[in-house]
Amino acid sequence: MDSAPRTLSSALTVAAKFLFPALWIGGFAIATATLFLFPSSWHGESGDPPGPALKWIFLGVTGVGAIFIMWSGGRLKRIRMDGTALYISDYSTEIVVPLRNVAEVTENYWVGGHPVTIRFRSDTEFGSQVTFIPKARWSWFGVSHPAVNEIRLAAAQATGG
């Protein structure tokens, strides 16, 4: 493996972590606020204003959606790797985690972008695990992203396994 760290995470991580949450939450918050403050500005196909339940449905969807989006996007990290370590960044702090600290690498095939989770043998400054979106590629369902196998192999070599 090269001595210079190679980026494994997608360049779209920044958008998934910061841009999409801001646009989605902001859009729903504005729509919800207008339903509460200016309900007459909303009209159905018949021209009538929406029923009173709609504003509460929007508020619930906005709240639940914001929590989910902040959780899923907020936990994403930028991942780079060289022959001895992972370089993990949340875009304000970067930490170095030795590959021998990698306990498990899994991929979620059911979620867009196929997020990869790296679990550690001991906690890091970012906790016991980190998640990243690997660079896009075409593959068959159920076939692991090459980054998953690359990290697994490098971790096994680092631990002598």
Image (cartoon, helix red, strand yellow):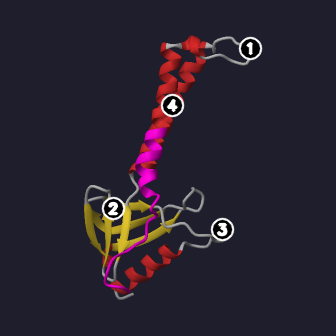
Tell me, yes or no, whether the two marked residues, 2 and 4, touch with CB atoms within 8 Å.
no
Q: Residues within 10 Å of mark 4 (few under 14, many from 20)?
A: some
Q: Which residue is mark 3?
A: 141
Q: Is residue 113 above or below residue 98?
A: above
Q: Earlier in the sequence, mark 4 or mark 1?
A: 4
Specify the segment rendered in magenta. Answer: 1-23
Tell me, yes or no, whether the two marked residues, 3 and 1, touch with CB atoms within 8 Å.
no
Tell me the amino acid under the disc marked 1.
Ser
Circle 3 or circle 2, nearest the eye: 3
- Gap between marks 3 and 1, in whole Å? 45 Å
Q: Earlier in the sequence, mark 2 or mark 1?
A: 1
Q: Residue at x 66, y 68 (%)?
A: 141
- Gap between marks 3 and 2, in whole Å? 28 Å
Residue 57: x, y in percent?
Answer: 57, 24
Tell me the amino acid under the disc marked 2.
Ser
Q: Is residue 107 magenta?
A: no
Residue 59 in sight from this viewpoint:
no
Q: Is residue 4 magenta?
A: yes
Q: Which residue is mark 1?
A: 46
